Amino acid sequence: MKKRSYKELRIFFILWGTQALSQLGSSMTSFALTLWLYQKTGSALETALLSICSYTPYVLMSIFAGALSDRWDKKKVMLVCDTLAACCTVTVFLLLKRDLLCLWHLYLLNALNGLMNTVQQPASDVAMTLIIPKKYYQKTSGMRSFSQSLVTVLNPILATAAFSLWGMDAVIRIDLGTFGIAFLALLFFVRIPKVRGEETKEKEPLLRAAKSGLVFLKENPLLLLLIGFLSGVNLIASAFDATLPAYILPLPNGGETVLGMVSSAAGIATMLGSVLVTFLPRPKNRVRVIYWTMLFSLSIENFLLAFSRSPALWCLGQFIGWSVVPVMNANLDVILRSSIPVEMQGRVYSCRNTLQFFTIPVGFFLGGFLVDEVCEPILAGAADGGMLQRLFGVGKGSGAAMMMFLLGIAGTLFCLGFGRLLEKYRYEDEAVEKE
């Protein structure tokens, strides 16, 4: 970027950098709490409920959170939500120090944290729109994706190290320290412009304001189709995420360490993909880029993992599948920010979150159920030396390999079918987006 670009993006750099640091601290706490809880209970289900409690408010309340975000001052919303989330972390710290921390405490506090994130995210998305010149949307989207990927790669490593060496206390102190930096930076060094007509939105009933986000999407079929497409992608991808541990952990050359390596490959891929998208030129057809990248990801990754028995190839499959995700995200981000009026973005983004992400818990359930109740029994009863065993192997984990294959077929057919619908539309970049 040129010197003029740095000046135009100075506020973005401050907000982006400090919020990413705070996100790293929060992610470290979440990961360490998972380790702490599993050590205490030994139950995968009770540990998984931490994520379920965080995610449920996000899916259920997003539509209303966006309407509230649109009528409230964005900076104040972010400061208040960050403060309440930090209070939850302090509560965990105090209960832990007094040896009073129970499962229901964590579930309740995670639900509150999820609710705060539900309100904060649309406010943060709109704030980014307000402080970023339109011509930098693609570049800044790549930078934000890079920081998220970096957090994904670093937080398990740092959290595990801090937890092992100094205990849960140290992880929480790091989290609170990063919160303090982000809070002070936002409070004193970031000015977020007001949205035109923001004050008048307080008179609009909440239900009507929430409904207006859905109405806007209905009146913009391209956006609604893209959200529907990514909802299906999330269903298949989350089923894959549920299948991956059942595939790798039981195999002789698998196990926890290998699963960690394969998972890290996804984070490294998105990080490098985020760097790439920052320098990519503006594509001729953003819609086509979105569905072709997902076709590439959902097909090659699943097929490569289904038919390979080498950890190196598993890592390669994850890398290939996730490397194009930042490219998709950047092009989707440009279309959304350019197509939705800024005064409507909070509620529309929140409607998008509900419609696009509700399939994730469904996908996790379906993936686990189909592996345990359908695919593994089929492979267990397969003829010795038959076609199924030659394709997917023998013993526990072979059913998960079969599930990977089925997900590859589903992803390919879904992307090709939906792509025909999306081909009817083409988003035209406005001249102001050009540098």
Image (cartoon, rainbow, N blue to C red):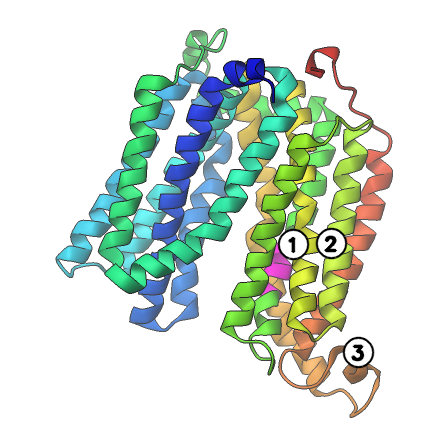
Query: Dots 1 and 2: beta carbons under 8 Å?
Result: yes
Residue 389 occupies quadrant: bottom right
Magenta-tinted stretch: 238-243
The image quadrant where one finds the N terminus is top right
Could you tell whether 198 is left or right of 363 in the image? left
Q: Residue at x 55, y 54 (%)?
A: 361
Q: Work out whether residue 197 or residue 275 is closer to the camera in this orientation and state it.
A: 275
Q: Examine the rendered structure and indicate whether residue 68 appears above or below residue 21.
A: above
Q: Is residue 137 visible?
A: yes
Q: Examine the rendered structure and indicate whether residue 298 appears above or below residue 12.
A: below
Circle 1 sits on which residue?
A: 237
Q: Main secondary structure of the magenta part?
A: helix
Q: What is the x, y in percent for residue 89?
A: 27, 45
As measured in the structure, the alpha-carbon distance from the residue carrying label 1 to the one carrying label 2 is 7 Å
Circle 3 sits on which residue?
A: 391
Q: Residue at x 66, y 26 (%)?
A: 334
Mark with earlier residue (3, 1): 1
Circle 2 sits on which residue?
A: 298
